[in-house]
Amino acid sequence: MCGIVGYIGSKNVLPILLDGLKKLEYRGYDSAGVSFVSNNSLQTVKAAGKIVALEKKLKDFADEQSSLGIGHTRWATHGAPTENNAHPHVSADGKIAVVHNGIIENYASLKAKLQQNGVEFKSDTDTEVVAHLISHFYQGDLKSAVIQAIGKLEGAFGFGIICKDEPDVLIGARRGSPLVFGIGDNGEYYLASDVAAIVNHTHKIVYLDDNDIVVAHHGGYEILNLQSQTVQRDVQKIDFDEDAVAKCGFDHYMLKEIFEQPEALRNTMRGRLNIADGNAKLAGLEANIRELRDINRIIITACGTSYYAGMVGEYVIEDLAGVPVEVEYASEFRYRNPIIKPGTLVLAISQSGETADTLAAMKEAHQKGATVLGICNGIGSSIARNSDGGVYLHAGPEIGVASTKAFSGQVLVLTMIALLLGRQRRVSFEHGMEIANAITEIPELVEETLKLNSAIRTIAEKYKDAKNFLYLGRHYNYPVAMEGALKLKEISYIHAEGYPAAEMKHGPIALIDENMPVVVIAPKDALFDKIISNIREIKARGGKVIAVTTQDCSPLDEFADDLIRVPTTLPMLMPILTCVPLQLLAYHVATLRGNNVDQPRNLAKSVTVE
Ligand code: F6R
């Protein structure tokens, strides 16, 4: 989704803005632009398409010296991805430039009023309204004009704002869209929608709250609320490994992140298993531990891949703790009237911690009195800060748009939560120990699974031109089938559907012919014989079967066209292993088709609008 970067300081701003924008590319965008103040004039340069197009245009400004500027990558919501609609947007008098993430919901009525006052609009965006509105209130004090303008806005925003007449002022403001403020050395300050954009300049970060307005000058800053009162916000020292946002020799972030899973999972479980007690020890839930004993129902809410991880969580929590669980798309939950009674716990899952629908679902759950726990990867993210407790994945930044290491980490966290809830209820000490021990072995088993990479590439070569794929799984691996299909769709643009294997005969079986590859997740478990029957049904109709199975499943040799054998673990932990070949299969099919897997078309990494 859109990205913001801003700078004020003693250095030349253009390289800082360009570098920041490149770091934000992973979020997904279709145009980019910058504004900077130089020699008492406001310069704005924009380009449709990728940042290289902007970079090319900026070559003409190589001699400009400016120490104040804002930049933006735009993911189109209102208006096509053209240069005209790209940010920054500038007021009619050419003085004020604005970059914006989010959506201004009342922009149409504001626009109509401004047009009545004679303002001419140049773009189709909601953001342009903001530049004109600030200009409308501007009487020589940018801070005051911004506060007045924000008072008129409905919707979500993260802003970066500069003014030609105030070359010593950089303003940022947020409501509902993430924005961080970075404090550099020697009176330098940064704005960004995501720490990744500025982490190579500073590790001192302020996570702005809703309705915070940060005003930075050369050498000082203040944070204000909408009443112009100063508010105090903690400066956090972030522990950020710069390798974490580099490709480190891999062709793509996605592949790097797939291969990082063993280490990421070690980090997720570090210090969180108490083998001697056969239990999980989750510091972020300590304050809720008594309440967890009394809950009688759980609603898991999330979007996309996080939703599928939630589905695995449903099965594991019900199995271990015997607490009924429902999994609901956050976008649905927020707009219906969910039943929340005393004893209902809501678990919100999000890699980024910034997904607008999930945040809104949490708000709805809070409104109805539920305790809301978060499972997030994004440290200090909005979801983490708006939850009543929770568990971080500690998987490190996920840059590839297609989520990979977050999925396995989320499943692991959910399994540890299930173990904790189970030990409070019906899981015996021995069973708890067995699960805790099995969890500790998982990173090594994922390492084993990753050795299948080149064999999976060979399979991908065979099927890369297919038009459709079906993914089937049962029980714990049904959500993995859904996730595998989503991965393939996102980056290869091949239509794919995930189904519970036995549902195939209720409809999708009609699609099967010799052109339909079917990925069947068939580990040796209690339902193995059932899934063999499903495979026979596919083969009888000429379908091609790619079976993801375990190392002890000889009957499959007979039926499957391609076999991917992963190691064995407890059935409830199998999704962490079976998801890996599906990630690799999607990756290889997509790269063999020549697609940019890190920035697939139309997609954004963190979906901060509805
Ligand atoms: C899939 C993917 C998306 C996200 C979804 C939720 O690969 O990346 O489906 O899973 O947008 O995002 P988070 O987890 O950040 O809330």
Image (spheres, grey):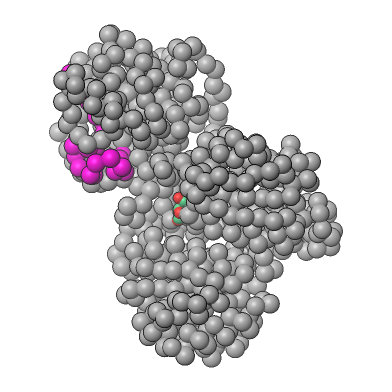
Picture coordinates of residue 348, whole percent (x, y): 58, 46
Q: Identify the residue at horizontal 59%, vertical 35% (top origin).
A: 367
Give the dominant element type of the magenta stretch: helix, strand or loop.
Answer: loop
Decide which of 471, 594 is in the foreground and name it: 471
Magenta-drawn segment: 73-93
Vertical position of residue 243 compared to residue 436: above or below: above
Residue situated in front as seen by the camera: 279 or 397: 279
Res. 186 visible in picture: no
Between 201 and 41, the one lying in front of the other is 41
* Image vertical order of residue 70 relative to residue 349, above or below: above
Q: Residue at x 53, y 91 (%)?
A: 558
Magenta run includes residue 88 = yes
Residue 546 percent location from the top left of the image: 47, 79
Confirm whether the magenta stretch covers residue 511: no
Above or below — where is 204 with respect to 435? Answer: above
Quarter-wise, where is residue 529 in the image?
bottom right
Q: Quadrant of residue 190?
A: top left
Residue at the image position 37 percent from the left and 43 percent from the top = 1
Q: Position of residue 234 (x, y in %)?
A: 56, 23
Query: In the rendered view, does 583 fall on the left or right side of 38?
Result: right
Q: Count every numbered label the image shows and give the total.
A: 0
The residue most toward the top is 140
User: Can residue 365 be seen from the camera position used here?
Assistant: yes
> Could you say where residue 486 lies in the image, as x and y percent from the top left?
44, 62
In which quadrant is the C terminus drawn?
A: top left
